[in-house]
Amino acid sequence: MSRRHIIIAGILLVLLMALTFTPIQAEKNLYVDTVISSEPSGSNKIIFVSGKVVDDDRNPIINAGVSIQVNDPLNGNVHVSFLHTDVNGTYIDSFVLSSGSPPGNYTVYITASKPGFEDSYKQITFSIIQPSFELAASPIMRSIELGQPVAYNITASSINAKEIMDL
């Protein structure tokens, strides 16, 4: 090989390496904000999981994947969902906890992801408390004339009284 061919081969090799090895940009971070709330629905509770996914500069991330898993106090799976953020970077999900759900701490695991970003993880706990008493009014409904006195019987009774006495 002549010196000229070696120089051309070297230039082509450097050019090929420059085109092949492009610099890799560092992934940006995602941040997931989450709020847990509830409202009664008959004897059940509707649990809402909502929040926002943003980047390092607090800009909303559109169409980020949000995975939600909820485990009960016995570590059983209660709810799983996958959704995407809207144009404001927000998401909202809901599920029903029946009145027979075990009392205690429920754990919510949230993962936000989008290509080009580092995933974000969040874990939140909320509690369902079983009251130790219940109230009852008697009669349930009564008609009266305006300005007339009315009387109701209010009864407070212990729930699980046997369990409490056995302790």
Image: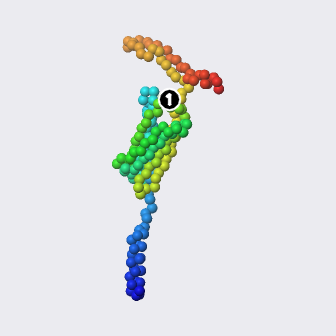
Position of residue 37 measured from the top left corner of the image (x, y, whole percent): 45, 37
10 Å crowding of disc 1: few (<14), some (14-19), many (20+): few
Position of residue 92 measured from the top left corner of the image (x, y, whole percent): 40, 42
Q: Please, what secondary structure does the residue beneath circle 1 have?
A: loop
Look at mark 1 in the image and give the residue it sits on: 100
* Residue 34 visible to the viewer: no
Residue sitting farthest toward the bottom? 2
Of the residues shown, which amino acid type is indicated by label 1?
Answer: Gly
Camera-side residue of 121 and 8: 8
Position of residue 113 measured from the top left corner of the image (x, y, whole percent): 43, 51
Relative to residue 167, is residue 114 depicted above or below? below
* Residue 145 visible to the viewer: yes
Relative to residue 37, is residue 111 depicted above or below? below
The part of the image, by quadrant, that contains residue 159 is: top right
Residue placed at 46% from the left, 39% from the top? 79
Residue sitting farthest toward the left? 87
Image quarter in which the N terminus is found: bottom left
Residue placed at 43% from the left, 12% from the top? 149
The scheme the figure's colours follow is rainbow
The part of the image, by quadrant, that contains residue 57 is: bottom left
Image quarter in which the C terminus is found: top right
Position of residue 126 measured from the top left corner of the image (x, y, whole percent): 51, 38
Residue sitting farthest toward the right? 167
Residue placed at 39% from the left, 12% from the top? 144
